Image (cartoon, coloured by chain):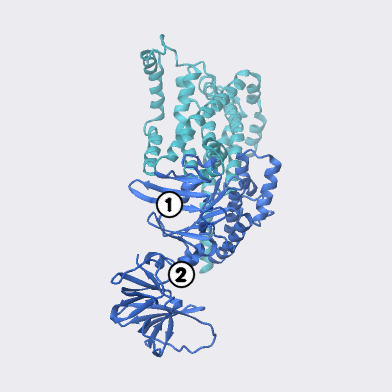
Chain colours: A blue, B cyan
Amino acid sequence: MRRGFAPWTDPSVRPLVRFEAVTKRFGGVVAVDRLDLDIYEGEFFALLGPSGCGKTTLLRMLAGFERPDEGCVRLGGDDIARVPPYRRPVNMMFQSYALFPHLTVAGNVAFGLKQDRVPRREIEARVAEMLALVKLDGMAGRKPHQLSGGQRQRVALARSLAKRPKVLLLDEPLAALDKKLREETQFELMDLQKRLGTTFVIVTHDQEEAMTVAHRIAVMDRGRLAQVATPQQLYEEPASRWVAGFIGDVNLLEGAVVAVDAQGVAIGGAGGRRYRVAAAACPVRPGQQVAVALRPEKLRLAAEKPEGVGENCVAGRVGDIAYLGDVSLYKIRLDDGAVVTASRANASRLTDRAIAWDDQVWLTWTPDAGILLTG
Amino acid sequence: MDARNAMSAGWGARLVLWAPYLWLVAFFLVPFLIVIKISLSQAAIALPPYVPTLDLAAGWSGLKTFVAGIGLDSYRTLISDDIYALSYLKSLEVATVSTAILLVIGYPIAYGMARAPRRLQAVLVMLVILPFWTSFLIRVYAWINILQTDGLLNRVLADLGIIHAPVAWLSSDTAIYIGVVYSYLPFMVLPLYATLEKMDETLLEAAADLGAPRWKAFWQVTVPLSLPGIGAGALLCFIPITGEFVIPDLLGGSETLMIGQTLWTEFFANKDWPVASAIAVVLLLLLVVPIAVYQNLQMRSVEGGS
């Protein structure tokens, strides 16, 4: 990520794409529900959510394939709701790639330029440039069915970039690739976006993919935005239990606010356990029901009861251990039956496992490790 | 044991491969060779009405007498009189024009069917096939009824005030075209529908996204991708229309000079089997060209992987 690139924090910058109270219904189903969203020029923006959350509908409204029922979609300040797809300075890379089977690779890449009656020489130059950009030089004469899945994906990318769109829309662009190729391609996409400076909007259901490529991520749930933030903010400062659970693994310890003081917020949980959170993102009052969200890697696991720790210390028994190679996951069953997951990096190759099944263990964490969630 | 299994599997596979060829040899190649043989004979008042006949029982000498008796006289007859060339040309003209009309009418129908909601499509296909439930002959006779001077068409046109005196539709090229286009429409619509229905609709979205309005996307994406269907439909119509006999005979009247009529006249009226056979052989050679074109198209579409 470019250091210091954060136009969304600067109120003087006008967004390139703006959704204003957009609603879209299909029959009786509300796909997008009074949604507001700003996307800035040069951003790599991800729309993330479970299937059916409305992310693809949002993208298709930007491409012009769907028209909002209410609200408006602006591009560079202009309402584009009534502009047909073929007149929008926006191009899309389709999930199925949608390559024209009767045209060669070069014919596919040139298709959009031909519609604009670009002179032939210029088309040839641009096609060569695009194919070089996606490392497909020498493939110009092939037909799509003669290419591998990865090559087809690159042709689709080259075709959608050939007209130099103001916004490139990517609909699950890597879903059809195998894991290894997908990871490589994610980095290539980031590199390409940085070099071209084009605004990219990607739709994905894969949170790792969104976290890898995007400057900012909009997490969607049932047609609404659950949170719009940078990957780090999403992980470390989720806005709700739902977002905390959707992005990565999380342990939620329920409780009620006991006191709010200079050291933060004290919370009383089940079994007389006491938690402390250094700061709350939103004001809370004593007695309010809240949850403390804890990421597994932020928990410390000890076989002996730590000395002099009253708060943020819970006892339990090891229920399960999953060895994943780089880390091991420990499922700890607390006294009241709740299960908390803690992870430990396997930093050393040769360790006797100090902690084994059914061991009595203690989990501790610092006050700034927990996140106070009210929503 | 294993070897024997492999052997029998081999025989089974070979039988499956050869079955269609055996069929073609028995019911197409052998009859066609007989037709060629007759076309090389001379007409005669005899039974069968031509000489020489091949007497296989006489062995080698029989074959020698036969070869000495045959000649290309029938083919010379075909060249000597314009009527044959004119018949071929008329047939090709009717076939070409009808195929063009069928394409213009059939394409929108097939396109509409392919874009209709899924559950409606089966019904629409049924509606296209429905006329086959009634005998072809009866349907053509029905057209005589519709097209005759006091028929349905003239009455409707008169009631609408479009014509003031009845039009003589029957015994005209118009009647032949109406009959041919009506009868062959399913053969054009079904292959077109089959290709259009397979087409991925996101391709049209991609074309729109890349700046092509609907009509441009239609010409640059839909039409090229439906070429195999256009080829199949056009040939399924063109080839049988060229040899069509019933429709021109019933609707076109006695003046019509299509090759089917000429062949019929030679065979039944003139009892000249050799010339009739020669007409059939030349017709087949004429049609081999479009069939070869079609085969080539098919091969290309198979190689194209679409």
Q: Is residue B214 above or below residue A213?
A: above
**What percent of the width, then of the height, locates residue B280?**
57, 29
Q: Which mark is residue A236?
A: 2
**What percent of the width, then of the height, locates residue B286?**
61, 31
* Subunit of label 2: A
Is residue A331 shown left or right of residue B255?
left
Label 2 close to label 1 by CB (< 8 Å):
no
Location of mark 1 (residue): A36
SS at mark 2 in the image: helix
From the image, which quarter does the N terminus of chain A lie in?
Answer: bottom right
| Residue nearer the viewer, A231 or A266 | A266
Amino acid beneath label 2 = Glu
Q: Earlier in the sequence, mark 2 or mark 1?
A: 1
Q: How many marks?
A: 2
**What percent of the width, then of the height, locates residue A13?**
54, 52
Q: Which mark is residue B265?
A: none
SS at mark 1 in the image: strand
How far apart marks 2 and 1 lie (CA) works out to: 23 Å
Is residue B264 shown left or right of residue A309?
right
Is residue B197 shown left or right of residue A139?
left
Amino acid beneath label 1 = Asp
Categorize mark 2 by other alpha carbons within 10 Å: few (<14), some (14-19), many (20+).
Answer: some
Which quadrant holds residue A274? Answer: bottom left
The residue at the point 45 percent across, 77 percent down is: A298
